[in-house]
Amino acid sequence: MAPHEQYHVFALPPQLLDSLIPRDIVNQPPSSPRLESPPPPIERTAAPSRACNVCLGTSFADVDSQRAHFRSDWHRYNVKMRLKGSDPVTESQFSKLVDSLEDSISGSASSSDEDLDQDSDAVDALVDRAKRLKTRSPSPSSVSKVPQTPQIWFHSPPSTQLGIYKTIFTQKTLSPSAYLDELKDMQTPKEGGRTWALFMTAGGHFAGAIVRVSKPEGADEGATKKGKQKKPVPDLEVLKHKTFHRYTTRKKQGGSQGLNDNAKSKAISAGAMLRRYGEQALRDDIRNLLQEWAEDIEECERVFIRASVSNRRIFLDYEGAILAKGDERLRTFPFPTRRPTQSELSRCILELTRVKVSHLTEDALREQDEAYLASLPKPKPIPSALPESPPKPKDTSAPKLSPEELQLRDKWTRLLDMIHKGKLDLLKTFWTKEAEALGGVDAPIPAWTGEKGGTLLQVAASAGQEDITRWLLEDLHADPTIDVSTDIVIDAGGESDDEGQAGPSSGSGSRRTAYSIARTKAVRNVFRRCAASHPDWWDWLGMEKGGARVPSVLTKEMEEGRDEKKKVRRKGLKDRIRERQEKEAGRAPSPTVEPEPVVPQSRSEARQEPTTGPRKLGGTSGSTEGVAGLTPEMRMKIERERRARAIEARFQAARK
């Protein structure tokens, strides 16, 4: 026999049929005492080198079938379940899971990206549902016998194995020998041939067919009137088929509109109404088709239905139903199916009626069986009684604190929290009561607090609290010359002063004080004002040990002079803007024009503008620095002037 020869299940060669014997290792529990727990289902269709370790050791006849398996929904589902710590499922178990899912499952041969998205959504839905229900696949140690595979396997010495789907046999068939007897009965031709009905529906798609799966009795006998041999009758013939589609499922959402309405409140959108109408139309179309094919369905030997639990009600148990729920002819597809189409029905018919063939010698089969039995997991011993766990020793590493220490820690926590949040009033009241208990204003902060600073003044300066820093310096006379600990790393990069002096340096190799770790210019100015007001309190300007490292003092006269300079710069800016406006309007500068209100001025506006060449109102061309710092009213005025000039230029160009 050729290695790639294919057989039809209803047309097996008599010589091959007479030599078949059941394969007990797969079809029934072996007698070996080593098999204490059930093995995962495995198909003897290929050498051990072509197998899938994820899907319970499934083997394949060739590389193409192995690659097709790796792209199938069954394999991808088992991979995801393995990653989540669950056991894989058999192909028949996965088929049942697919039947209970509303969304359509598209396989590896999907014709579009949309099909692939729906496939991914459906497999993810199965994984999520398994997680919600907390259902795990049966453990090998919990089953008393070898799980059954979807196929029944027969062996023909010396090196031929045949696999046939069990679903095409009668449901009363149990033993391997009974399967073999019925297989031999199937080879007897039947008048009119054997017919099957196949129906698939999912995601609004439907496909149905009436198929003759065996030749009629006497089909190839006799000759034509001219003495020529009759044209051979094919083993398979599609007698009737029908496909249609209705809009019932929102794209990439999964589930029908009816299931969504039952799970949630009824949607009132236009799309939901269209999907409800599509569901009703799909149900009516299918039942009308069943009524039309009633006579053909009555003569069918098997009726295969692929539908979810909710969609199975379309075919069964309704008034005037053609099929009854307890009909012995009803079957489900024992393998994953894709979107219901005519081509998918043809593929399923071939899959059901085509015999699986492999060629392994008896020695190879024996070695494979031994390796298979050795790979079975051993059952876990069940302890009679759980031993009592010894009491855990108490953790004595953490020292116990006395009530006084706990109370002191609570006071420090509350004090530091007030400083960080800037609650000066609460801080004054709290300090009046607890100053002595905490050790005074210059007391070192405990290390367990993890604060960035060794004293209250350093904490306030680092937190940027201007009012609390002033209160600590002027009212409590906090010492600004205390050095910051070298173990504390603080980013002291602050804002630059008006005179161009940058914030204090925080290099790890230099000495730092409370002023050095101040983050804002406002806090640093507090130190400078206090140094100017009370120069005899501390060595404010000293850089060596004992000095506060304040670079300069800040007196009221200095601040007033700085404000006066700002006013002069702002007034000069206003005068220049007024001159530009008058020049553009063609009028001479008027000395009686009252000055505009003082507006803030940025440093970029204080630059000296060129005195030669044309100048435009609002600054140089392509620059926004000319209007930076102006009030919104002045900006609007400048913008109106720009627009007026542009309109006038367009009018002049039009006149020319």
Image: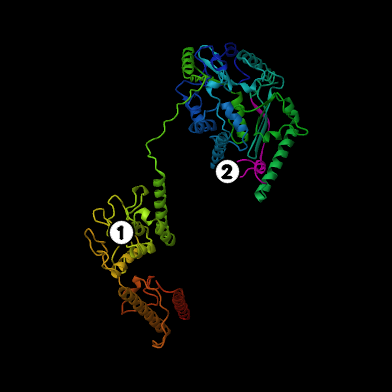
- Estimate the x, y position of residue 466 in percent, counting from the top left: 37, 63
Magenta stretch containing residue 655, yes or no? no
Residue found at the very far left of the displayed protein: 544
Q: In this orientation, which residue lies closer to the viewer: 476 or 649?
A: 476
Compare residues 19 and 217 and report the one nearer the observer.
19
Magenta-highlighted residues = 236-265
Within 10 Å of the Cα at label 1, are there few (<14), some (14-19), or many (20+) other Cα atoms? many
Looking at the picture, how far across and down is residue 108, in whole percent? 53, 34
Q: Please name the residue that numbered disc 2 is placed on.
A: 252
| Structural distance between the alpha carbons of marks 1 and 2 | 62 Å
Q: Which mark is residue 514?
A: 1
Q: Does residue 40 show up?
A: no
Q: Is residue 221 above or below residue 417?
A: above
Q: Position of residue 337 (x, y in %)?
A: 59, 32
Left or right of residue 25: residue 584: left
Residue at 56% x, 42% y: name it. Answer: 114
Relative image position of residue 579 (x, y in whole percent): 38, 83
Q: Amino acid at mark 1?
A: Ala
Q: Nearer the viewer, mark 1 or mark 2?
A: 1
Is any atom of residue 473 visible in this view?
yes
> In the image, what residue occupies the spot 38% across and 77% down?
616
- Residue flagged by tag 2: what amino acid is it? Lys
Q: Image check: 576 left or right of 287? A: left
Quarter of image, res 253: top right
Q: CB of mark 1 within 8 Å of CB of mark 2?
A: no
